[in-house]
Amino acid sequence: MNKTVNIDWGNLGFNYIKTDYRYISYWKDGKWDDGNLIEDNMLTISEASTALHYGQQCFEGLKAYKTKSGKIQLFRPDENAKRMNNSLSKLLMPEIPVDKFIDACKQVVKANEHFIPPYGTGGTLYLRPFVIGVGDNIGVKPATEYIFVVFCLPVGNYFKGGMTPCNFMIADYDRAAPHGTGANKVGGNYAASLQPHKVAVDRGFADCIYLDPATRKNIDEVGAANFFGITINNEFVTPKSSSILPSITKYSLMHIAEHYLGMKVYERDVPIDNLDVFKEAGACGTAAVITPIGGIEYNGHLHVFYSETEVGPVIKELYRILCGIQFGDIEGPEGWIFEV
Ligand code: PLP
Ligand code: COI
């Protein structure tokens, strides 16, 4: 493919860019069709679609990376496929075979190869798979038809500055209920996060941090990313909670911390009133990659971890290894990389 596009690869943010092709597949009469690539980025759906009224929809986020030798690779797309199926079954939507999901992602990446940021620019091709309930429906019940789409766009940093520390504030609101859909990637959770996010940004913070909705004593999530901290004993600690999205990046970092850096790794409660145990803290996710947390404002006080301007050594090392694996510079554990 020799197509070129006029994009300033070094200055990409996290903004919509229309790329050339997206994959679309329809579910009707109990089955998914084969799906195909299309050029149109507009969807025409019934005004009575359950996705529009009752939030019957879910999505995923994963990235394609260009390696130094020019290969293209996906990072753990099978995990996104499984998590999407958890979201789908939670909202009584039809699951998507893992192979179909991965094949759709590969087709979209290949067709839009000219939109993949070159190796060394720091940019990646972000893939956004989603499923919506459609068709003529008005009662609060599952749709009878569904659409699965995967589109993509080149992205840079999610939080301004990328690997530079950001400050966060504790939200007064909850994004999910204790036994609700917090562990699923469904739009309703993000609708509930818009207002607390705005409050945080208006106050000069990068985003807000949610406490666990049952007790409001422990850290749950950092905006659209998971929280992790490095204790003064050099352990990797991350919240254990049923109301946070199980982050594929977080589980990858836990593996890296344990098997590449020899650290002890714990999923446990992270009390908001005991942050002194951490010498470094970060937010992690596909979009966020790793964003070092400079400080957290809670009860009118900014608790600073390593520094508000410098990145701590452990987070630097985790970032080096994670990105090294994703961009093909470091050998990853078996099964993490899918060549396109
Ligand atoms: N938490 C939320 C609410 C998210 O939206 C995301 C992004 O996907 C994450 C955490 C990080 O998950 P992952 O590392 O799988 O991208
Ligand atoms: C991701 O990291 O993939 C996300 O979905 C985060 C956000 C952009 C919703």
Image: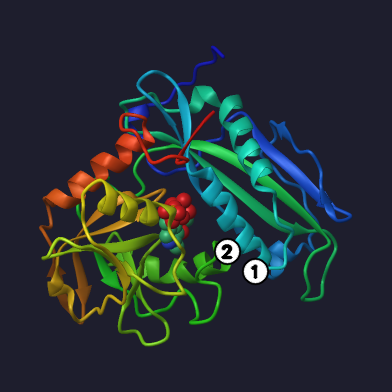
Q: Residue at x 12, y 73 (%)?
A: 276
In terms of depth relative to the viewer, which is nearer, 59 or 318?
Answer: 318
Q: Residue at x 30, y 84 (%)?
A: 217
Relative placement, left or right, of 302 versus 114 is left
**The disc labelled 2 sits on which kind of residue?**
Val
**Residue furthest right as drawn:** 29
Relative placement, left or right, of 84 versus 153 is right
Q: On the rendered image, what quadrant is the C terminus found in?
A: top right
Please state the horizontal and vertical placement of residue 52, each as a whole percent of the image: 70, 63
Q: Which one is closest to the eye, mark 2 or mark 1?
A: 1
Mark 2 touches mark 1? (CB < 8 Å): yes
Tell me which corner region of the image, top left, top right, bottom left or bottom right, holds residue 112.
top right
Give the residue at mark 1: 90
Label 1 crowd (10 A; few <14 / some 14-19 / many >=20): some
Q: On the rendered image, what quadrant is the N terminus found in?
A: top right
Distance of label 2 from label 1 (alpha carbons)? 9 Å
Label 2 crowd (10 A; few <14 / some 14-19 / many >=20): many
Disc 2, SS: loop
Relative placement, left or right, of 226 versus 146 is left
In terms of depth relative to the viewer, which is nearer, 78 or 122?
Answer: 78
Please state the horizontal and vertical placement of residue 275, each as a whole percent of the image: 17, 74
Q: Residue at x 85, y 56 (%)?
A: 30
Please state the horizontal and vertical placement of residue 56, each as a whole percent of the image: 68, 65
Give the residue at mark 2: 186
**The disc labelled 1 sits on which kind of residue?**
Lys
Position of 108 relative to 311 (above/below) = above
| Residue 311 in sight | no
| Residue 212 in sight | yes
Please state the horizontal and vertical placement of residue 165, each as a whole percent of the image: 19, 53
